[in-house]
Image: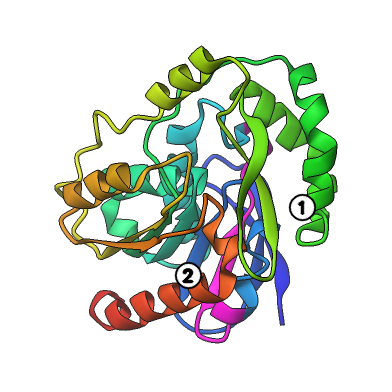
Amino acid sequence: MSHFITLTLRDGSTIRAKVAGQGPPLVLFANMVSWEFWSHQIPVLAQHYRVIAPEYRREYVPGSTALDALADDVPDIIHALGYERALLMGHSIGAMVLARVIAKTPEVAAAVVLADGFLHLRILPGPLHHLQPYLVPVLKALYPHTPWVLRQLGSFAALWADQHIFLHREASSEKRKMFFSYPFTPDKSMVLRVGAALEYHDPPDFSRSTMPVLVVTGGEDRWLTVEQAQRLVNDLPCGEHVVYPSIGHMTPMIVPELFNRTVLEFFGRVQGDVL
């Protein structure tokens, strides 16, 4: 049975979190503003763990320049839940946040899954009206799988415009087709500018990040190439890498059954040594 709780952070700010299940703590950080991104994961993971999916502070919408501030919130969230450390999982921007956490405050991370997560993102401003020709077909494609997207439309539209992200068909599987944002415009120079901005460079100092870390990458991800993800794995003292060859950026949503099996196998294998 799932329910919501309110967490009070060190500075007095409050955030809401979805909680389900019993067992070792597993905290999920989404790439969007809502816990609902994890709708395919929470029921399955909650059979084995106490799953907590916090929402971000409203003033810290992912995609802004507040990634370091979001990372600073993670220890507060774990401590507000009553734990010293927890299993952690993040997708995309959530993984960017957790990469900073394991470098800055590794003591709170027992083991970590970084799904489709790159380390650096340069913000390129783009006017919101450029999104209009793309938005309707994308929403129609997303709605059957994530009806809550309409409630978050204002945040998503602002985020996409802020990053100059445009919308394109990303990947498909036998059962579902997902649309997602990736750097694409008719202006080829903009594609090159955005692509260069996502290059893996100046990694954090992971020398203290000795916890097990699994990096999950879609082989057709246009945000993060397999080669860039492998460079991240190579920088981690205890990094592992799983690649889904024909999948794009939204691995937890495109292949949820496969993704859930991967996560459960990893945490089940390492948790006895870290919790």
Q: What element carries label 2?
A: strand
Residue 151 visible in the current orientation:
no
Q: Quadrant of the C terminus?
A: bottom left
Q: Which amino acid does label 2 sit on?
A: Leu
Label 1 sits on what residue type? Leu
Which range is magenta? 44-59
Q: In this view, does 90 lie to the left or right of 44?
A: left
**218 relative to 272, above or below:** above
Q: Distance between the residues labelled 2 and 1?
A: 27 Å
Mark 1 lies on residue: 142
Front residue of 184/165: it is 184
Q: Residue at x 18, y 47 (%)?
A: 235
For label 2, the crowd category at 10 Å Cα-Cα, with few meaning under 14, some 14 to 19 and many 20 or more, is many
Q: Which residue is pictured at 55% across the width and 48% down the height?
A: 9
**Is residue 19 depicted above or below 187 in this figure?**
below
Mark 2 / mark 1, whichever is N-terminal: 2
Q: In this view, does 188 lie above or below 84?
A: above
Quadrant of the rendered image containing residue 24: bottom left
**Residue that badge 2 annotates:** 26
State which quadrant residue 64 falls in. top right
x and y, in percent, of residue 165 in the image: 61, 28
Q: Is residue 171 left or right of residue 212?
A: right
State the residue in front, 130 or 169. Answer: 169
